[in-house]
Amino acid sequence: MKELTLEMAIKALEAAERWARDVAGIPCSTAIVDKAGAVIAVHRMDGAAMATTDIAIEKAWSAVAFKIPTLMMSRWLDPRNVGELLGDHALGMVGRGKGRLCFIPGGIPITDDDGEVIGGIGNSGIPSGVGDISDTSVSQAGISALYDA
Amino acid sequence: MRMSLEIAKKMLLAGREEAQSLGILCSITIVDENGWLVALHRMDGAPIPTVDIARDKAWTAAAFKLPSSDVSRFGTPEMSGLGLNAQNWNDRLTTIPGGLPVEDGDEVIAGVGVCGGTPQQDVAVCQAAIAAIHS
């Protein structure tokens, strides 16, 4: 796997949708971006809130931009981590990136076999960012489908 | 009929097949009756800005219930709504051809926008996507 194609993106989105519907039971939006952060595909499930598409795109973009899951970025802003991690320094990043930078958990970078970031996936609509049923786990379900033999 | 992700996927697939037969690389966007994004696909190799332009066309078509190219009619003083075509009041508004409203009977249920080919090719892809609804 060297480059994300539309076909692979659709495969990941379908898997994410299945997981969101059958396991979580919550409608949501999922987005796939390429290694430049440019959108490849977005799906909004029936019943998911209208704003979720843009937030899903922002999460995918942010995951690519920092090459880490947005879950890890959200920890920079957690008041319990002030003085540790990036602490106050991270507050300056809020609203940066032409408004695209998003610190909400749910975005995960997609890497190739060498660990290079080749794209990202973002999900929005599950009312929790962390835990078993969360935006992050929907995104992970999407990524897992990319590695099916 | 209401727009659903299932219908949107069917439209995107038909639009992509039409684009392939025309030999163009494009982005196709489906929005609901209020202009909100339902699904979008960018074909491999299609330029990055086509995503947003296709979405703008779809929004314009759904919001005005008109083909995006027809919105330029609001530039004539004889029309009611003079100035609605002015592109400085809304980030999404565009008068570029390639966005069509999706109609079910006399009701607009969605908008489709395509960017990547000539205006005629973009419109042809839109029409192919719309034709797939009832198949």
Image (cartoon, rainbow, N blue to C red):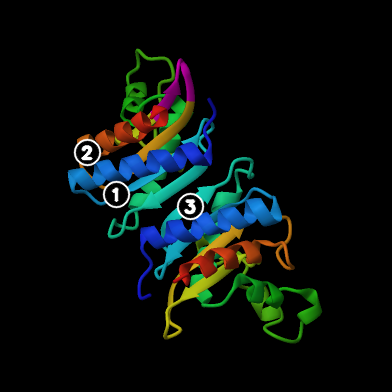
Depicted B93 relative to depicted A101: above or below = above
Residue A94 in sight: yes
Which chain hosts label 3? A
The disc at residue A60 is none
Residue A65 among those drawn in magenta: no
Which SS class for mark 3? strand
What residue did someone put label 1 on?
B26
Q: Which residue is mark 2?
A: B121
The type of residue carrying mark 2 is: Gln
Secondary structure, magenta segment, majority class? strand
- Residues packed near mark 1 inside 10 Å, few (<14), some (14 to 19) or many (20 plus): many
Residue ID at (38%, 43%): B12
Secondary structure category for the residue under label 2: helix
Kindly indicate the quadrant of the structure image that contains residue A139.
bottom right
Which residue range is magenta in the image? Answer: B101-108
- The answer to whether mark 1 and mark 2 are in CB contact below 8 A is yes
Give the residue drawn at x 38%, y 67%: A4
Residue B57 in view, yes or no: no
Question: Which residue is at the far front?
Answer: A149
Numbered mark located on residue A42 in the image:
3
The quarter of the picture where the C terminus of chain A appears is bottom left
* Amino acid type indicated by mark 3: Val
Vertical order, A38 against B32 (above or below): below
* Residue B103 magenta-highlighted: yes
Tell me: residue B123, above or below residue A127: above
Does residue B49 appear to the left or right of A71 in the view shown?
left
Q: Given the image, on which type of amino acid does mark 1 rest?
A: Cys
Residue drawn at the location 34% of the way across and 58% of the way down: B48
